[in-house]
Image (cartoon, rainbow, N blue to C red):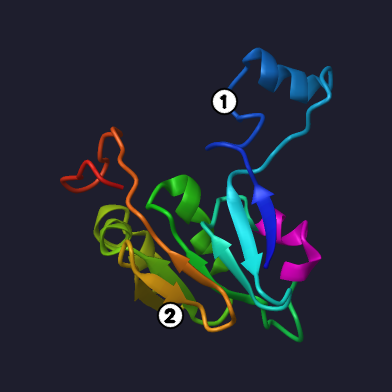
Amino acid sequence: MWLRVLGSAAGGGFPQWNCSCPACRAVREGSRPCHPRTQSSIAVSADRHRWFLLNASPDIRAQIESFPALHPLDGRATPLQAVLLTDAELDHTLGLLLLREGRALELHATPAVHETLCEGTALLRTLERYCPVDWRPVVPGADVSLDDGLSYRAFDVPTSKRARFGAGTERG
């Protein structure tokens, strides 16, 4: 299995656009040995030819450009096979809109995430006006094969975060 961390910063990246804390100032000034980072996203592949994204951050275009294995193939073909969403946070989903110019987008998400993206943020309803979205429902605890030697098992993560859309639950 091949894994590439495309971004590892929290929402807004590092330095965060609206922050002047000592760490963000230091990266802007170059006064510490630290580097800017994009928002969190990971690419995974079994064969280094077909890739799956874990989340699609708002920085996805720069992340794709920084990793040649994700560059377009012949014409507008892409090595991206699907996006697996861990939640419906904007930091993990806004990049979906940037992926609209490819073929149909295969999207793995729980029903709760899908509902939030359709009814809460309306992000998927907007995206579907630009490209077909092939939603693959994810059931926590169930094994899912990605048909290329990779598989995954989703699990609920307890959270105390306030639900922004819908009633929310105590489970992720």
Task: Give how far across and how far down residue 77 sits, in percent.
Answer: 68, 83
Residue under the image location 22 percent in, 41 percent down = 170
Helix, strand or loop for the magenta stretch, by majority? helix
Residue 70 locus on image (x, y percent): 72, 69
Q: Are marks 2 and 1 in contact (CB under 8 Å)?
A: no
Q: Between 138 and 14, which is closer to the camera in this rendering?
A: 138
Task: Name the side, left or right, on which 53 lies relative to 67.
Answer: left
Q: Which mark is residue 18?
A: 1
Q: Position of residue 160 (x, y in %)?
A: 28, 32
Which residues are drawn in magenta? 61-70
Q: Is residue 171 magenta?
A: no
In terms of sequence position, does the residue under pointer 2 or pointer 1 come before the other? 1
The reply, left or right, for residue 151 in relation to residue 7 is left
In this picture, is 123 found above or below 74? Answer: above
Q: Amino acid at mark 1?
A: Asn
Q: Residue furthest left?
A: 167
Quick one: label 2, few (<14), some, or many (20+) residues within 10 Å? some
Q: Is residue 130 visible?
A: no
- Residue at (43% x, 55% y) in the render: 86
- Three-letter residue code for mark 2: Pro
- Mark 1 crowdedness (10 Å alpha carbons): few <14, some 14-19, many ≥20: few
Label 1, secondary structure: give it. Answer: loop
Image height of 98 relative to 105, above or below: above
Residue 64 within the magenta-colored segment of the rendering: yes
Viewer-nearest residue: 65 or 126: 65
Q: Residue at x 68, y 19 (%)?
A: 23
The image's mark for residue 132 is 2
Where residue 154 sits, quadrant-wise, is bottom left
Residue 38 image-quadrant placement? top right
**Which SS class for mark 2?**
loop
